[in-house]
Image (spheres, rainbow, N blue to C red):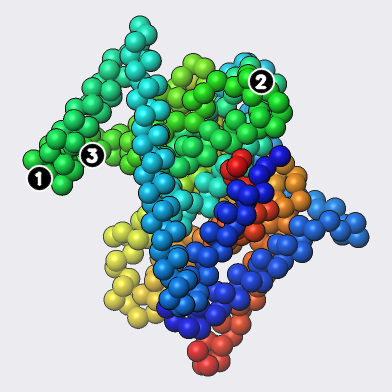
Amino acid sequence: MNLGVTVLGAALLVLSTGMLLIFTRPNKKRAPTSLREIEAITSLRRILGGAMEQGTRVHFGLGRAHPGDPNYASTLAGLDTLESITRSTLTADQTPVATSGDGTTSLLGEDTVRGVYRRDSTIDRVPGGNSLLAGVTPLAYAAGSQPVISSPDTGANLFLGHFGVESGLLIPDEPAMDKEFFGGSDSIPAQSVFYAASENTLLGEEAFALPAYLDEKKPYLASLMVQDLLRLIVVFGLLVGVILVLAGVL
Amino acid sequence: MRSPVAAAIAIAAGVIVLAGYFLPLPLLQVVRLQFLDWAMLLAAVAALVGIINLTVGHFRKAAKPGPSRMFSIVVVTSLLITLVFGVVYGASDSRFAHVVTNIQIPIETTLLGMISISLAYTVFLFVRRRKSWSNSVFIISVVFFLLANSWFLVFGQSIPVLSEIISGIQKIPLAGSRGIMIGIALGSLVTGLRILTGIDRPYSG
């Protein structure tokens, strides 16, 4: 690896970690964070309320990335969201069910759902099998998720993780099915498909902001602040790069 | 209460693997590769647990009368046949690979065909139902850039100034997707750091 790129990468990592740790610390002088409204997230709250009222279960698709995949961060955001959703539907008749295309994610999904109930001391209410390995290839995952997506028990299908073009098979195929849909991904093809299928779609970095919106915990809000600052640094770097190119230095 | 021991192990493993990318110390590289080997082994065991879970679920469905019973019977039967042949002949056996590939490829090709129909239907529904100005801009952009990157602007490629303008137009979707990718990269970085620093733990431990 190029030494300059390595040093720059390490510096960015140290800077981001430092900012994250500083912003996570409690500080009474700092003004409370206000989050801009994202229509899809407002809809998600309505979707969850609707599913609880109807007594149906929420299906959560965590995607098909595995922990060694660079795209796994979106699945981690999905697991955080699954935890928030499980917590907010603790009083619901049915526990959420998660599907994924990777064995480790499947275990983490089960652990996430059961962990929420364990901390609430209601673990005896949770049956097993809340997280399913739907298939290990992209298309097998999409096909294997179909029984859960179209099950009469499922009132809402939520997706947050890494998906590809196979997301075309995950979207509701028939409007009369009366199932709510919500999607977010780090992949551009999946975002395009989800956006065409539903207005309840998160675009770009909104997928990583979802845990902060659902569960206004300090670490999640700190992440958003770090992302904003890093974005400013990137914008500044791009502008400097353009000026240097125009000046003939680069 | 989450276990501090589990968090300490996770953080230490994460820091060692990450440090291995930046510091070329031989000992660190050995430890990093060992950790990655263990991770692969654990991932394989997790996949096995997932497959057993899937099989048990389909066994239960196959035992109950219902509309999806036949699908579960097919899934369990194919899984068992593949498992037996895989164990007897080995995964690298050419006859075994030939049979699996010739079943898997036609099925996946069919699914890809279904995706294209599903996407065309989704676009049709999009145009019919969502009539706000932003959605109109979206659909016009889709059609315009599809044409711009195909044959539509070929006639101007040989004209000096026009060819540069066309080249610029063709790069607009790329610029947009790079903007989205930068946001996603920053989100991924910070999500990873939350796990690495133990601020966020996707495991109960």
Task: Return the mark for residue A204.
Answer: none
Both on one chain, marks 3 and 1?
yes
| Vertical relation: A18 (above or below) A179 | below
Chain assignment, label 3: B
| Vertical relation: B175 (above or below) A50 | below
Residue B142 position within the rendered picture, expressed as x and y whole percent measured from the top left = 44, 51
Q: Nearer the viewer, residue A83 or B49?
A: B49
Q: Secondary structure at mark 1?
A: helix
Q: Earlier in the sequence, mark 3 or mark 1?
A: 1
CB under 8 Å between discs 3 and 1: no
Residue B90 position within the rendered picture, expressed as x and y whole percent measured from the top left = 16, 41
Residue in view at x 91 percent, y 60 percent = A29
Residue B137 position within the rendered picture, expressed as x and y whole percent measured from the top left = 53, 50
Residue A55, image quadrant: top right
B121 on left or right of A117: left
Instruction: Give amino acid for label 1.
Output: Ser
Of tags 1 and 2, the one toward the viewer is: 1
